[in-house]
Structure formats: structure tokens, C-alpha cells
Image (spheres, helix red, strand yellow):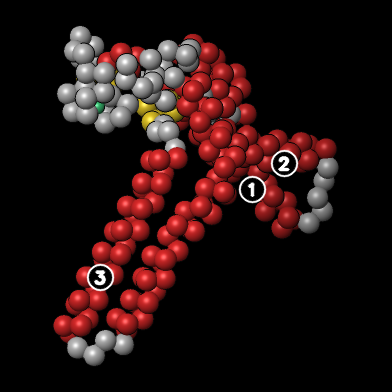
Amino acid sequence: MIKCPRCKQLIDLHSSKCSKCGLKTTQILLASNKEAVKVLKTRRKNENAHIKHIKQIVKPLDEQIKETKKLYKFAENEKEKNALAYKLNDLRIERHNTIAKINRENYEAIYFTTLIPSDISRKKLILYVCLLGCFGAHAFYVGRMWRGIIITALWCVFLIGFFYFQYFTINNEFLVYLFGDIYTMSGAVAVILVVNDLIRILLNKYKIPVKIPPEK
Ligand SMILES: [Zn+2]
């Protein structure tokens, strides 16, 4: 049994496609992490331009929403108020759908799945999390950059604090308490995150971004 990366339905490996969303089993088995990482990278690079583009397109809708809100505030009777509330709701739905459509058109879909794609080695993943987990190696390996950066940053705060206290003395007792707590907490959170990831990897519950190849 495998889990469909698109709709999370359980699929028998012998069946040809997902019974819920119709994704072909061959497509699922060819899902690629390396391709997903490429897409995520370009996404990050174009993020600002993309947000600007969306803002531009929904601008007239935003203005209408603003205008309707104003009218609603000064509406004189219930009937008018109701009509405006409906209009406001419709406008909001339209705004939401417009943004979803732009995203669909501009972005290739990336799914976070617990199914380990063929271009990721589970052994490597375990090795990375055990040896270099505190520097987010396992997260960087599958392209989960933010998780990797957060773990590394927390761990670095711990290391800096630890070595500082080893070699220097701070004469102010309050500062000693404050920094002592910050760096130990930072280290503890990093370790918790890494252990959590290790358990997830061992239980096949670690989420890995994948791109699903087009249907042939
Ligand atoms: Zn499915």
C-alpha cells in the first residue's frame, strides 16, 4: 500500500491508479524530489515579483471591497445592508478564486508526501539526521530549506552561548541568567526538532516535497 501524494488516499500497488483522484500509480512511483527542489528554488527567487503581480491583478477587486465596506457602514436599512453583505461575500470569493487561478497557472504543483521518492535514499536521510541533524542536513537534503535554516540557527545560538560561557566570564549576574537561559533553550529546541525529525523518518512519516511527472 502507498499513500497518494495528491489526495492522501491509500492505494494498492497493484491497482493502476488512485481511486479518489485518478493519479496513475506509475506517476506516483516516478515522483521526484530533485524536480520539486528546482521548482521550489525558482519559486523563492520569484516570490516578490509574484506577490506584486497578484496585488496588481486583484487591485480593482480590493478597491471594490473597500468601497462596499464603506457603503455597508453607512447603509440605512436592513435590506440594503443584507444586499451589501452578499456582495461583499461574493467579491471575497472572487478574490480568493482569482489568486488560486494565478497560482495554478504560474506554479507547478508541489506535494509534501511521506512516500519516499525514488531519487531520495532513506539510508542517507537517516545518516544525515543522526550525524549532522543539528545543522539541518536532512532537511537541506530534501529541499526543506526553512526547516534546515531554523534548526541551524537555533543550534548556532547554542554553540555560541556554550563557548562564550566556557572562555569568558560575565560579571553581571542578571545577564548570566538571561543568556544562560536563552542559549540552553535554543539548543533544547533544536534537539527536539531533530529528534522529532529522526522519529518521523524512522516511522516513514517525514514529509518530503515531490513533483509528480505529467501523465503519459
Ligand atoms: Zn489520489
Do labels 3 and 1 touch, CB within 8 Å?
A: no
Measured along the vertical axis of the image, is residue 104 above or below residue 92?
A: above
Measured along the vertical axis of the image, is residue 196 above or below residue 96?
A: above
Identity, as a three-letter code, of the amino acid under mark 3:
Lys
Q: Which residue is mark 2?
A: 161
Please tell me in which quadrant of the rendered image residue 46 appears: top right
Q: CA distance from mark 3 to mark 2?
A: 56 Å
Q: Which mark is residue 182?
A: 1
Which residue is found at the position 18% from the left and 28% from the top?
20
> Which quarter holds ligand 1?
top left
Mark found first going from the N terminus, 3 or 1:
3
Mark found first going from the N terminus, 2 or 1:
2
Residue 150: tell me if it is visible.
Answer: no
Work out which quarter of the rendered image holds the C terminus and state it: top left
Left or right? Give the position of 190 relative to 198.
Answer: right
Identity, as a three-letter code, of the amino acid under mark 1:
Ile
Do labels 2 and 1 touch, CB within 8 Å?
A: yes
Q: Position of residue 65 (x, y in %)?
A: 36, 70
Badge 1 density bin: few <14, some 14–19, many ≥20, Cα 10 Å: some
Q: Position of residue 156 (x, y in %)?
A: 68, 37
Q: CA distance from mark 3 to mark 1?
A: 50 Å
SS for tag 2?
helix
Q: Which residue is mark 3?
A: 87
